[in-house]
Image (tube, helix red, strand yellow):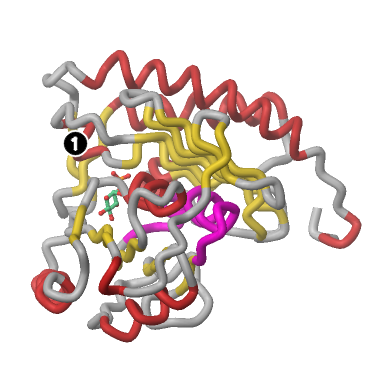
Amino acid sequence: MSDCSAQKCNTDEFYNVVLKLTKSCGELIKSRTSNRSKKVETKSGAIDFVTETDQEVEKLLIEGLTEAFPDHKFIGEESVSSGAHADLTDAPTWIIDPVDGTMNFVHSFPHSCISIALFVCKVPTIGIIYNPMLGQLFTAQRGKGAYLNGERITVSGTKNLSDALIMMEFGTSRDPEKRRVILENQQKLMPQVHGLRALGSAALNMAMVACGAADAYFEYGIHIWDIAAGELIITEAGGVVIDPAGGQVDRLSRRVLGASSQELAEQLAKELTQFYPERD
Ligand code: IPD
């Protein structure tokens, strides 16, 4: 499947299968959210949690998609944590974060979601972000617009930093230099914007930009699975996704900036102190 020009994909079939699987996995997440005694492990020495639900949901999604589409590939957060390689080739590849906002899930804070995207020839083709606790299902297929629970959504269109509500995150790393940069950006932006917010889920922050509830989001330290679905949902809603220093986003660079307009994205990029995490 490397000849991209010759490749013809029935993306509606892919979409229908993944939507059904995502909804049923969402029920599983929802049924476990309020239980405060979840089995939690810490990954990579940071405050980066994984629960048995993260692992189970990723397994269910990969098994269900493999059964329907045996030649498709996967990049899954928990598979990569267990040693798989994050290899994005031209083959149809599902990029999965089974529970984005695991910290929220652990604390029963109702802002976590499944984030799943299909890339074909390295192009985002399907994106789904589903928060089952709040019943928010964000969907997009390339060229067909973005939707929240079946209703078309668009970005706010805000162009000026001085009118913007900005999503930013504190992340799970305890690297002192990263902490310094985050606090510096918070200090710089606070007096210039309407407000700063953090939902604790990269995917849900991007979904807020897509539906016009926020105007921009940036983060250093995310992974491709945190942002793959959000990228398509924002762009299909009329927004832009770039590198936080400006220019094209590099999905494996662990850096992202999404905004409701190119003007706002560029203004924000100019203001930010930059941080370059180790690449995926
Ligand atoms: C995390 C969340 C969080 C962001 C981190 C991500 P996870 O994903 O999206 O908001 O700040 O960078 O790693 O670990 O909950 O899937």
Q: Is residue 26 magenta?
A: no
- Give the residue displayed 24% in from the left and 61% down from the top: 168
Image quarter in which the C terminus is found:
bottom left
- Give the residue displayed 55% in from the left and 39% down from the top: 147
Q: Is residue 235 magenta?
A: yes
Residue 92, image x, y percentages: 70, 48
- Give the magenta-colored segment's residue range: 222-240
For residue 28, above or below residue 159: above
Q: Give the residue furthest to the top.
A: 31
Residue 191 can be seen in this image? yes
The residue to which callout 1 is attached is: 41
- With 188 as the anchor, is 73 left or right in this view? right
Residue 134, image x, y percentages: 33, 26
Q: Residues within 10 Å of mark 1 (few under 14, many from 20)?
A: few
Q: Is mark 1 within 8 Å of ligand 1?
A: no
Quarter-wise, where is residue 28 in the image?
Answer: top left
- With 218 as the anchor, is 104 left or right in this view? left
Q: Secondary structure at mark 1?
A: strand
**Which amino acid is tagged 1?**
Glu
- Give the residue displayed 60% in from the left and 53% down from the top: 236
Name the residue nearer the viewer: 183 or 40: 183
